[in-house]
Image (cartoon, grey):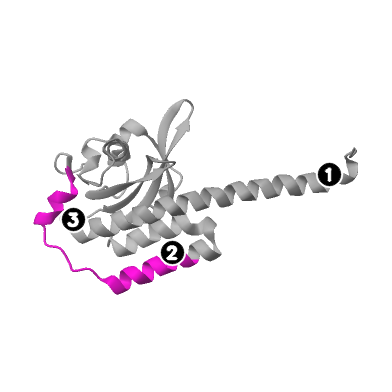
């Protein structure tokens, strides 16, 4: 599969020269309210809810959340939540130096990638290919360790400054959501260990 044109990387300022739609604050507030509702009632689903929100608010065709992890002594980005046309790739990992996420984390700023498949072979194999990707970092434990991203697959259809503003705001929300998600998972593990201990208690000599 051929990706037209070379890869280009630019900052949010490059979007200022493109026509931009006006903010839809009502839709934005509804989306943020829905995310808060997930946090309150189903926190384990917040990462997928974030990916879904990016897909809708940023008018993307694919969207997701990539988390930096260590795997076999190497750093990789795991697509921990994916929405849209790339949803079947949820759980996929890419080496840090073979993913645009690595550049975003290193610079700790929102970046726009045009035709990233020309430089990153793994993305060139994805179907459909990436026409343009918008990625924003967010911090985990005080350091940039994850990205929230939106993808357009069509060659002629790029993002605008309003998309960048929304993605930046959602990334700030994601930093809080990921901390809560991790806390919930840790609590579930503690509860499971406690339940196992209680189930074994008749056979444990207490002194």
Please tell me which of labels 1 and 2 falls first in the chain.
2
| Residue segment shown in magenta | 10-37
Residue at 46% across / 32% down in the picture?
Answer: 70
> Label 2, on which residue?
35
How far apart, in angstroms, are the residues tagged by discs 3 and 1? 59 Å
Mark 2, secondary structure of its residue: helix
> Label 1, on which residue?
200
Residue at 32% across / 40% down in the picture?
Answer: 101
Using the rendered view, name the quadrant where residue 166 is placed: bottom left
Mark 1, secondary structure of its residue: helix
Relative image position of residue 118 (x, y in whole percent) = 21, 38
Relative image position of residue 5 (x, y in whole percent) = 14, 42
Nearest to viewer (mark 2 / mark 3): 2
Residue at 11% across / 57% down in the picture?
Answer: 18
Main SS, magenta residues: helix
Please tell me which of labels 2 and 3 falls first in the chain.
2
> Label 3, on which residue?
158
How dense is the environment of label 2, judged by Cα within 10 Å: few (below 14), some, or many (20 and up)? many
Name the foreground residue: 184 vs 84: 184
């Amino acid at each position: 599969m051929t990706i037209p044109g070379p890869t280009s990387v630019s900052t949010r300022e490059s979007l200022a020269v493109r026509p931009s739609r006006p903010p839809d604050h009502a839709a934005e507030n509804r989306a943020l309210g829905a995310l808060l509702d997930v946090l309150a009632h189903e926190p384990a689903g917040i990462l997928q809810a974030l990916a879904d929100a990016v897909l809708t608010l940023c008018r993307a065709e694919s969207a997701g959340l990539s988390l930096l992890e260590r795997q076999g002594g190497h750093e990789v980005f795991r697509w921990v939540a994916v929405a849209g046309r790339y949803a079947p790739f949820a759980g996929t990992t890419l080496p840090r130096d073979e993913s645009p996420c690595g550049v975003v984390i290193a610079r700790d700023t929102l970046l726009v990638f045009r035709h990233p498949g020309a430089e990153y072979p793994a993305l060139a194999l994805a179907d459909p290919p990436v026409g343009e990707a918008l990625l924003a970092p967010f911090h985990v434990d005080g350091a940039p360790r994850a990205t929230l991203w939106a993808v357009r697959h069509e060659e002629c259809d790029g993002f605008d400054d309003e998309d960048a503003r929304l993605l930046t705001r959602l990334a700030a929300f994601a930093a809080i959501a990921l901390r809560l998600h991790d806390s919930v998972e840790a609590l579930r593990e503690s509860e499971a260990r406690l339940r196992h201990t209680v189930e074994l208690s008749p056979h444990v000599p207490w002194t």
